[in-house]
Image (cartoon, rainbow, N blue to C red):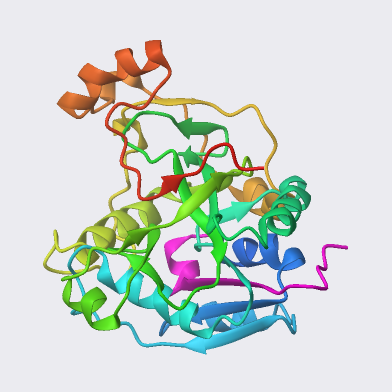
């Protein structure tokens, strides 16, 4: 249905102990498989059956690359960039679709993605696409919608050996030399992209409260803010109410998420009295809401306009 005979699309993502951390890594892979000719699954040294579960999807498009995480890479999320780059080194397509283990694509958006890839495949100005994010929080009915979360990011781009994950694996840039990339002497070149209205359903903050505590602690570890990481979920439960702001989600979820949503046992209704705001964000947010713009937004891309 989605096959493009003249070009090849490679999907890729990375995961380690996906069940332990409560991320929808299987749904993530399945959501993009229909438009991919191959999917590179970079699987870290897991102990919870993650690798076996991916194997059991029994899809010939999936190619597993086994890795061992270097826990010494705990500054600025470099371990995530390393794992992402391993995936980049194995893709063989003309286009690359990076999907992270907590990100899912809605099936209704697949035709739109394919249409845009076909349309701009031969346009040398367009290097990729910028997609909006829906950051779910607490349950599947709420979205974090404050200025503290990123609005857009690059997930689909033309395959280019110069492209590397930038800092962590949130975005990408082009680098002239591998040495300059690794030693930090080269800042890289931002990709030139077009907007693509095909949202990334980001389920990073929808998991059991104990698994969320585990994730929050170890995320801090890999960014150099914690000295030790936890081996298993702790007894204490994460307090979702300390989020700054959320809004109701009124849309539909990807079909691959049906079972996960049915099994979710936590109903979240934000207790605003517990909300914790960054001082600057609390001051600027009303102005952003009024003007309907993001003030001082971080943009790791060059947005193209007037491209037909």
Where does the image place residue 140, in percent across and percent down from the top left? 57, 39
Where does the image place residue 38, in percent across and percent down from the top left? 68, 78
* Quadrant of the image occupied by residue 2: bottom right
Q: Is residue 19 magenta?
A: yes
Q: Residue at x 58, y 79 (%)?
A: 40
Chain part drawn in magenta: 1-23
154 and 308: which is toward the camera: 308
Q: Is residue 125 visible?
A: yes
Up-down: is 167 above or below 5? above
Up-down: is 195 above or below 89? above
215 and 299: which is toward the camera: 299
Q: Residue at x 37, y 26 (%)?
A: 245
Where does the image place residue 289, in percent across and percent down from the top left? 39, 15
Residue lying farthest top?
A: 290
Number of callouts: 0
* Placement of the C terminus among the 4 image quadrants: top right
264 and 158: which is toward the camera: 158
Up-down: is 307 above or below 241? below
Residue lying farthest left?
A: 227
108 and 274: which is toward the camera: 108
Where does the image place residue 27, in percent across and percent down from the top left? 64, 61
In this rendering, position of residue 278 left or right of residue 93: left
* Quadrant of the image occupied by residue 224: bottom left
Q: Is residue 7 magenta?
A: yes
Q: Residue at x 54, y 55 (%)?
A: 125
* Placement of the N terminus among the 4 image quadrants: bottom right
Q: Residue at x 50, y 63 (%)?
A: 101
Q: Is residue 49 visible?
A: no
């Amino acid at each position: 249905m989605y096959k493009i005979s003249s070009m090849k699309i490679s999907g890729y993502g990375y995961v380690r102990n996906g069940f332990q951390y409560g991320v929808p890594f299987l749904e993530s892979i399945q959501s993009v498989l229909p438009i991919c000719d191959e999917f590179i699954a970079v699987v870290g040294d897991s102990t919870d059956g993650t690798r076996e579960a991916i194997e059991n999807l029994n899809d010939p498009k999936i190619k597993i690359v086994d890795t061992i995480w270097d826990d010494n890479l705990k500054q600025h999320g470099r371990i995530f960039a390393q794992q992402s780059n391993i995936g980049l080194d194995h893709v063989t397509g003309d286009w690359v679709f990076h999907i992270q283990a907590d990100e899912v694509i809605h099936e209704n958006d697949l035709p739109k993605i394919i249409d845009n890839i076909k349309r701009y495949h031969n346009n040398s100005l367009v290097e990729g696409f910028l997609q909006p994010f829906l950051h779910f929080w607490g349950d599947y009915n709420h979205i974090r919608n404050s200025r503290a979360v990123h609005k857009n990011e690059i997930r689909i781009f033309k395959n280019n050996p110069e492209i590397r994950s930038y800092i962590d694996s949130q975005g990408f840039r082009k680098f002239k030399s591998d040495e300059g990339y690794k030693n930090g002497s080269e800042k890289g070149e931002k990709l030139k992209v077009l907007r693509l209205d095909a949202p990334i359903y980001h389920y990073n903050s929808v998991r059991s409260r104990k698994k969320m505590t585990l994730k929050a602690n170890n995320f801090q570890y890999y960014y150099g803010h914690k000295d030790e990481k936890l081996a298993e979920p702790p007894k204490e439960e994460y307090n979702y109410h300390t989020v700054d702001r959320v809004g109701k989600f009124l849309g539909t979820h990807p079909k691959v998420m049906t079972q996960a949503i049915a099994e979710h046992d936590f109903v979240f209704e934000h207790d605003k009295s517990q909300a914790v705001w960054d001082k600057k964000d609390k001051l600027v947010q009303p102005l952003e809401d009024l003007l309907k713009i993001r003030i001082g937004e971080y943009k790791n891309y060059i947005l193209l306009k007037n491209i037909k």
